[in-house]
Image (spheres, rainbow, N blue to C red):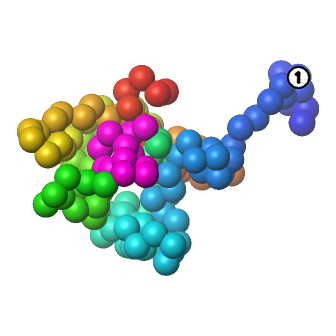
């Protein structure tokens, strides 16, 4: 593709990152393959988000649950996802800048003690210039 700056050297789309497992699409349609992921879209919308939300695989593992692991006894996938989304929503309301980087911290119970997980979120353009939210670890941008 030719641009005013010359030909593109390479591109890597958000959709490709989701397909490659680098991003977890929190707006994906319900699935019966993984019951934990069955109502992601519903939880995201209930938390007040109307634009697509994705989280990096590393942030997902740090704040919600290990990709191929289990949560500590008494912990709930939906509850952890809800905590991340509600803390992000609160941080966004405090910041009030549409395209600013939002830094926030969630408290995650690790079985023996509570851990603080620093996260960041960016509202930016998606593959088709639509607004999207990406949640990540602070060093991942």
Local crowd size for mark 1, using a 10 Å CA cut-off: few (<14), some (14–19), many (≥20): few
Q: Residue furthest left?
A: 113
At horizontal 36% and vertical 63% (from top left) the residue drawn is 44
At horizontal 38% and vertical 39% (from top left) the residue drawn is 59
Q: How far across and down, in percent of the image, does residue 139 sit? A: 42, 23
The mark tally for this picture is 1
- Left or right: residue 31 compared with residue 136: right
Nearest the eye: 70 or 27: 70
At horizontal 43% and vertical 37% (from top left) the residue drawn is 58
- Left or right: residue 8 compared with residue 21: right
Q: Is residue 138 above or below residue 23?
A: above
Residue 59 on the magenta span: yes
Viewport quadrant of the N terminus: top right
Task: Give, as a single range, the part of the protein colored magenta.
Answer: 58-69
Q: Is residue 19 above or below residue 77?
A: above
Nearest the eye: 98 or 26: 26
* Residue at which label 1 appears: 6
Residue 103 on the magenta span: no
Nearest the eye: 21 or 125: 21
| Secondary structure state at the residue bearing disc 1 | strand
At horizontal 8% and vertical 39% (from top left) the residue drawn is 113
Q: How far across and down, in percent of the image, does residue 4 sit? A: 85, 26
- Left or right: residue 63 compared with residue 28: left
Q: How far across and down, in percent of the image, does residue 135 sit? A: 41, 42
Q: How far across and down, in percent of the image, does residue 27 sit? A: 48, 63
Q: Is residue 135 above or below residue 140?
A: below
Q: Residue furthest bottom?
A: 32
Q: Does residue 36 show up?
A: yes
Q: Does residue 121 show up?
A: no
Nearest the eye: 130 or 117: 117
């Amino acid at each position: 593709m030719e641009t005013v700056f010359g030909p593109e050297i390479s591109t890597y789309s958000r959709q490709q990152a989701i397909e490659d497992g680098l991003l977890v699409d929190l707006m994906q349609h319900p699935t019966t393959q993984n019951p934990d992921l069955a109502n992601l879209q519903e939880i995201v919308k209930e938390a007040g988000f109307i634009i697509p939300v994705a989280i990096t695989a590393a942030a997902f593992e740090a704040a919600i649950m290990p990709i191929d692991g289990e949560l500590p006894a008494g912990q709930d996938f939906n509850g952890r996802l809800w905590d991340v989304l509600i803390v992000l929503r609160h941080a966004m309301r405090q910041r009030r800048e549409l395209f600013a980087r939002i830094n926030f911290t969630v408290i995650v119970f690790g079985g023996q003690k509570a851990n603080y997980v620093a996260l960041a979120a960016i509202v930016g353009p998606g593959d088709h210039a639509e607004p999207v939210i990406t949640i990540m670890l602070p060093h991942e941008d």
